[in-house]
Image: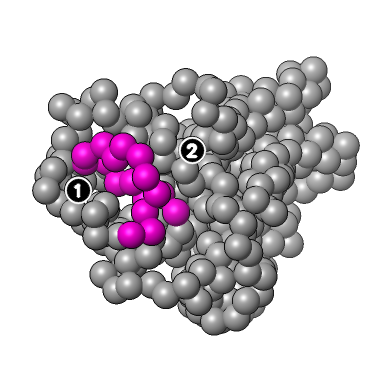
Amino acid sequence: MSMSSAAMDAVLRLRQMEPESHSGSVVVDCDTGNDYDGRLGLRISSIFVIFVGSFVGAVLPIILARHSKMKVNGTAFFIAKYFGSGVIIGTAFLHLLSPAFEALNNPCLPDGPIKEYDFAAAITLITVFLMFTVELLVSRFDIFGHSHDSPEGVDRPVAILQKGSAQTSDDIEANSNASTAPASANPEEKPGFHAPGIPNDVSYPPGGQDHLGHHREHESDASSLAAQMTAIFILEFGVVFHSIFIGLTLAVAGDEFNVLYVVLVFHQTFEGLGLGSRLASAQWPDSKAWLPYLLGFGYALSTPISIAIGLGIRSTLQPGSANATIINGVFDSISAGILIYTGLVELLAHEFMFNESMRNAGIKTQLFALGCVALGAGLMAVLAVWA
């Protein structure tokens, strides 16, 4: 059961008519969806608890990746990166696309065009095409400006990854010949120890100077930065809008509040981890070193702020009304399209198929990374039972 499903329990109550009617029809009981039943102190506490969980998930990976003085196990960082990718993919399908179908096919919606076509699928499809078009255009123009600053956020996470993987090479060992060949073939690669098996490149696009097996010229650095920024902003947009709506739902939830409270703490923490691991592993120039912190902090604030707003207007908030249901369904569809594109193209395809280091890694490393992705998606599938 998705987040919308939990909210819809208060909005949609399907009751079989009494036997004396002999009609066998179903009555749809539609209400406002506002089941606020007090417990204001507990609801206020959710603002701070969810903020802490979201902040830890989104910002802590950035801090650990940037500061070499902090001892971080490299394998743990590797797991977090691919686990986060699975969380993003699981969120897209089970926490966004499924609720979007439920909302836009809600029998409580008024008759009209909204009920005559499957708009959830159409909006998601349009969003996927739009995301690709935006990234294609951005990659051709120097929208974000070209910077020759040394990138921040690449060497330190990679160093952390390498140190940790050097101690656990037995578990995730790769083909030593394949993993060492790129290091000698690429004159621009930075000096230092490179552990076998774990891909050394965690920048965007994966594959570094040899993306898709072709040498990348210096002139492409600006477009690479623009593509990186675009992909991250798209991901941020998708998770933030999703977080806003679930915060409003939690603010006026009724009997299911306790369950939603606990589930959303884990949901926002793991979703923040998916975003934070991408922010931590991205290539950030020195001039924009503050930006990942800002994006992570913005995500951490989105749900707490929406909970506070929902509590402030709890007497008038009607999340089950027709207009609110349509708006929620449309934005869930948009966010689903964004995260589906980001998860399958930016994360899975680029990391596994277009990343030369991962392509040359051993089968154990590839399966280990894929298992981390499956674990993240599976966890979100389990959370979808309650929220």
Mark 1 neighbour class, 10 Å CA radius: few under 14, some 14 to 19, many 20 or more: some
Q: Position of residue 127 (x, y in %)?
A: 53, 72
Mark 2 neighbour class, 10 Å CA radius: few under 14, some 14 to 19, many 20 or more: some
Part of the protein shown in magenta: 187-203
- How is colour applied across the structure in the image? one colour
Q: Secondary structure at mark 1?
A: helix
Give the image quarter of residue 53: top right
Q: Secondary structure at mark 2?
A: helix
Q: Which residue is mark 2?
A: 156
Give the image quarter of residue 382: top left
Compared with 260, 246 (above or below) is: below
Look at label 2 and name its amino acid. Arg
Residue at position x 26%, y 52% in the image: 183
Q: Quadrant of the N terminus?
A: top left
Residue 109 vs residue 173, the one in the foreground? 173
Look at label 1 and name its amino acid. Thr
Residue 258 vs residue 195, the one in the foreground? 195
Total number of numbered discs in the rendering: 2
Q: Position of residue 166 (x, y in %)?
A: 27, 28
Residue 57 vs residue 260, the one in the foreground? 57
Residue at position x 86%, y 45% in the image: 316
Residue 177 visible in the picture = yes
Residue at position x 72%, y 57% in the image: 324
Task: Give how far apart the Cα atoms at labels 1 and 2 are.
Answer: 20 Å
Q: Is residue 35 left or right of residue 189?
A: right
Residue 50 visible in the picture = no
Q: Which residue is mark 1?
A: 180
The first of marks 1 and 2 along the sequence is 2
